[in-house]
Image (tube, rainbow, N blue to C red):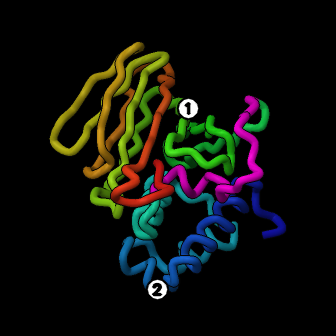
Amino acid sequence: MENASPINAHLATRLRGLRTGSGMTLDGLAECTGVSRSMISLIERGESSPTAAVLDKLAAGLGVTLASLFAEKDGTAASPLSRRGDQQVWRDPESGYMRRNLSAPGFPSPIKLVEVVLPPGARVAYDTGHRAATVHQQIWIIEGTIELTLGEETYRLAAGDCLSMHLDQPTVFRNLTDAPARYVVALATDARAGAGLHR
């Protein structure tokens, strides 16, 4: 991973750690996610820039959610403060959407916050549905307008709107305007159904 970007190197280490920690092989993860073994291997070596859709499939296959791939392992020594300049930023190579982890890395908390900027005309689709734990999510629009399809239901969300949802159905985010949209995603996992999961 000497030539991997810092974010790809982090994703590589995190994905490999979650997979081996769960006792799953490359073949096993490939079979349950539909992502090829060779692609998973490339990601785990930091040699591929995976899309958000691929990462979400892998996260679901591991029983976690997308944001957990970007997170640090929880630790008692982690600071509760997250400075703007230290927050990890990632851009989806397919849609150009940008996500910023707002919550303090490694600090144990049932709530995680992520800031997202969805470029004009961008579309991001997560086709994974059921997960091992119940994950609650709220989307609060700060700027712009997005169209969000959750299963069979479609919502048009403008600045100030907030939508509550569960991560249990395919979800599609679209920006049909000619201006960027910016929103905050808040996530929490039902402790009775699982732990440590957040998209």
Residue neighbourhood size for the residue with mark 1, other residues' Cα within 10 Å, grouped as few (<14), some (14–19), many (≥20):
many
* For residue 109, side relative to residue 77 (left or right): left
Residue 127, placed above or below residue 161:
below
In space, the residues marked 1 and 2 are separated at their CA atoms by 33 Å
Q: Which residue is mark 1?
A: 115
Image x and y of residue 172, in percent? 32, 42
Q: Tell me the kind of residue under disc 1.
A: Glu
Asked if residue 192 lies left or right of residue 59, the reply is: left
The part of the chain drawn in magenta is 65-84
Which residue is farthest top? 160
Label 2 SS: helix
Q: State the residue at coordinates (49%, 29%).
A: 184
Q: From where the camera sits, is residue 57 visible? A: no
Q: Can you name the residue that lies furthest to the right here? A: 2
Q: In the figure, is residue 134 to the left or right of 5? A: left
Q: Main secondary structure of the magenta part?
A: loop
Measured as percent of width and height from the top left, residue 182 is found at 51, 24
Q: Earlier in the sequence, mark 1 or mark 2?
A: 2
Residue 80 found in image quarter: top right
Packing grade of label 2 (10 A; few <14, some 14-19, many >=20) is some
Q: Position of residue 165 (x, y in %)?
A: 30, 38
Helix, strand or loop for disc 1: strand
Q: Is residue 126 above or below residue 161?
A: below
Q: Quadrant of residue 16?
A: bottom right
Quadrant, the N terminus: bottom right
Residue drawn at x 55%, y 36% is 114
Residue under circle 2?
27
Q: Amino acid at mark 2?
A: Asp
Q: Is residue 141 visible in the rendered structure shown here?
A: yes
The quadrant holding residue 75 is bottom right
User: Is 36 in front, or is 108?
Assistant: 108
Q: Nearer the viewer, residue 12 or 23?
A: 23
